[in-house]
Image (cartoon, rainbow, N blue to C red):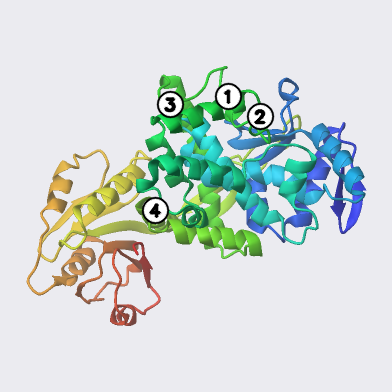
């Protein structure tokens, strides 16, 4: 099997495990400057291996390694070597090379990076059709640059490897659209915005209609007979102990989901840490990453996630390498990799403005996220305070009854002429003597005040509405930061 290293073709004996490891290492190093985010994510969370003996017919698939908290990508080195011989001999050139191998690896990676929210929904067939389309579209965008022969053409036309790509999903979309056009958006608007979950929900809503149901049944038959897509096998990831994992399974399934979610948290944490460290993105992956953020920022879950990032980052001021929290052991070798130990920062206080401008639905979302985050530890992670200019209610722990807090939040307490934040600041000055960091969730419409003791070392305004320049000018000091979480 061959790849290009420093513009020269280099051959590897894939019958040797060490040679396969070297090949993957050289491949990733060769392209790490081109795709720094995705390749660093691969190195941090994923392991790339040869297919197992009981899956020799598969080209690629993934599995979860719960012991090491890694996702394992399996690729068929022998098949890839065979494809290289077919394509490169036919084209009389090194056409099937680095980018084509990365296409297979990135296809597996992107299923987990962008689309793992669909893992435990019903209708896995429908999910796989739609996510394959989006993943393949992104892979083509990532890898087709500066190539003489289109990657899709190589897989689909030369090798007859069926890939769900634009033509297939377009035909599918408009065939269903003919029967149910009333609530379907323009296809190309949908595609450009990468809203794969919306496309899934639209198809799902119509799947009981006769024409749509017939189309989906045809998918199923084609998939079972391997006539539709054979790039990889997503079902292998779901299966544990020989059964399909769905939302309707028993408690073992829920345990499986929890374990998988722990691994996905590593992906989310990597993204947060990568972004917060101001590391660069490759040109093509940067465009995809920014489009993903821009498109999805209006989704309230992601706005809440942005708030969660601020809180989790505030809770941990530093990370050190330590053998006390192990990362993983390399298989068959007694090599132990250091893990990460997070060092807690100042005490964190989260204040929520309940003076009336933040809607009840939004408040409930904030409350659910905050208490969900706080309950992860036996000891509370941070204090939660609800404030207006005439009342303060404090609730420190998840274990207390939160109904009274929600009722307090629903009162929509208004003051005449605007909210006075100095009431909160006076409370903070009196209540806390140790160093604290404050996250204040508010709409930003209040009488400005910054009479704060020196022990309040950092103050984050998390704004739910747009604010004018006067706000930014007033809170210009270094200890203040302003973050908007709503369009």
Of marks 1 and 4, which one's residue comes earlier in the chain?
1
User: Residue at label 3?
Assistant: 254
Of label 1 and label 3, which has the lower sequence position?
Answer: 1
Seen in the image, is 119 located left or right of residue 302?
A: right
Which residue is the site of mark 4? Answer: 308
In the rendered view, does 142 fall on the left or right side of 364?
A: right
Measure the C-alpha gap from mark 2 to mark 1.
8 Å
Nearest-to-viewer mark from 1 and 4? 1
At x 38%, y 73%, the residue is 479
Q: Label 2: state its secondary structure.
A: loop
**Dot 2 crowding, Cα within 10 Å, few <14, some 14–19, many 20+:** few
For marks 4 and 2, the one nearer the N-term is 2
Q: Give me the residue at 77% from left, 54% from top.
A: 29
Is residue 110 visible from the viewing direction of this image?
A: no
Could you give the CA–CA distance between mark 3 and mark 2, rounded to whole angstroms? Answer: 33 Å
Q: Return the residue at label 1.
A: 221
The earlier-in-sequence mark between 2 and 1 is 1
Q: Are marks 2 and 1 in contact (CB under 8 Å)?
A: yes
Q: Residues within 10 Å of mark 3 (few under 14, many from 20)?
A: some
Could you say whether the residue bearing mark 1 is in a helix, strand or loop?
helix
Q: Which mark's residue is nearer the viewer, 3 or 4?
A: 3
Q: In which quadrant will I find the C terminus?
A: bottom left
Q: Residues within 10 Å of mark 1 (few under 14, many from 20)?
A: few
Image coordinates for residue 318, horizontal then vertical, percent: 51, 57
Q: Residue 49: give x, y in percent of width and height.
A: 73, 35
Which residue corresponds to mark 2? 227
């Amino acid at each position: 099997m061959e790849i290009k290293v420093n513009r020269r073709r280099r051959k590897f004996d894939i019958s040797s495990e060490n040679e396969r490891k070297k090949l993957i290492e050289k491949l990733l190093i060769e392209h790490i400057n081109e795709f720094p985010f995705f390749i660093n994510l691969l190195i941090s969370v994923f392991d790339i291996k040869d297919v197992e003996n009981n899956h020799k017919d598969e080209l690629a698939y993934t599995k979860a390694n719960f012991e090491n908290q890694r996702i394992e990508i399996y690729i068929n080195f022998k098949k890839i070597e065979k494809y290289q011989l077919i394509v490169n001999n036919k084209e009389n050139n090194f056409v099937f090379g680095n980018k084509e191998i990365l296409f297979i690896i990135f296809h597996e990676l992107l299923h987990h990076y962008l689309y793992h929210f669909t893992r435990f929904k019903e209708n896995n067939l429908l999910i796989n059709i739609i996510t394959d389309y989006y993943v393949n579209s992104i892979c083509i965008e990532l890898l087709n640059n500066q190539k003489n022969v289109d990657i899709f053409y190589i897989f689909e036309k030369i090798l007859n490897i069926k890939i769900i790509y634009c033509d297939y999903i377009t035909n599918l979309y408009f065939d269903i659209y003919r029967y149910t056009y009333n609530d379907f958006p323009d296809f190309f608007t949908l595609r450009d915005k990468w809203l794969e979950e919306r496309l899934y929900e639209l198809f799902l809503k119509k799947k009981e209609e006769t024409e749509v149901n017939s189309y989906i049944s045809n998918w199923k038959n084609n998939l079972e007979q391997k006539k539709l897509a054979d790039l990889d096998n997503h079902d292998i990831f779901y299966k544990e102990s020989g059964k399909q994992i769905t939302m309707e399974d028993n408690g073992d399934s829920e345990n499986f989901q929890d374990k998988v979610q722990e691994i996905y948290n590593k992906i989310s944490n990597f993204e947060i840490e990568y972004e917060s460290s101001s590391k660069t993105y490759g040109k093509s992956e940067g465009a995809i990453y920014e489009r993903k953020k821009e498109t999805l920022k209006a989704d309230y879950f992601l706005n809440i996630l942005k708030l969660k990032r601020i809180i989790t980052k505030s809770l941990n001021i530093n990370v050190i390498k330590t053998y006390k929290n192990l990362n993983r052991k390399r298989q068959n070798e007694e090599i132990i990799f250091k893990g990460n130990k997070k060092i807690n920062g100042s005490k964190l206080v989260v204040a929520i403005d309940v003076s009336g401008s933040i809607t009840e639905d939004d408040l409930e979302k904030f409350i659910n996220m905050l208490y969900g985050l706080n309950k992860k530890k036996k000891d509370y992670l941070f204090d939660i305070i609800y404030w207006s200019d005439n009342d303060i209610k404090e609730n420190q722990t998840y274990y207390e009854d939160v109904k009274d807090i929600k009722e307090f939040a629903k009162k929509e307490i208004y003051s005449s002429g605007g909210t006075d934040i100095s009431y909160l600041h006076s409370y903070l000055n009196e209540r806390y003597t140790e160093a604290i960091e404050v996250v204040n969730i508010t709409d930003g419409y209040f009488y400005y005040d910054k009479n704060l003791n020196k022990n309040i070392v950092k103050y984050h305004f998390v704004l739910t509405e747009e604010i004018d320049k006067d706000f930014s000018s007033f809170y210009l000091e270094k200890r203040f930061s302003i973050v908007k979480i709503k369009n």
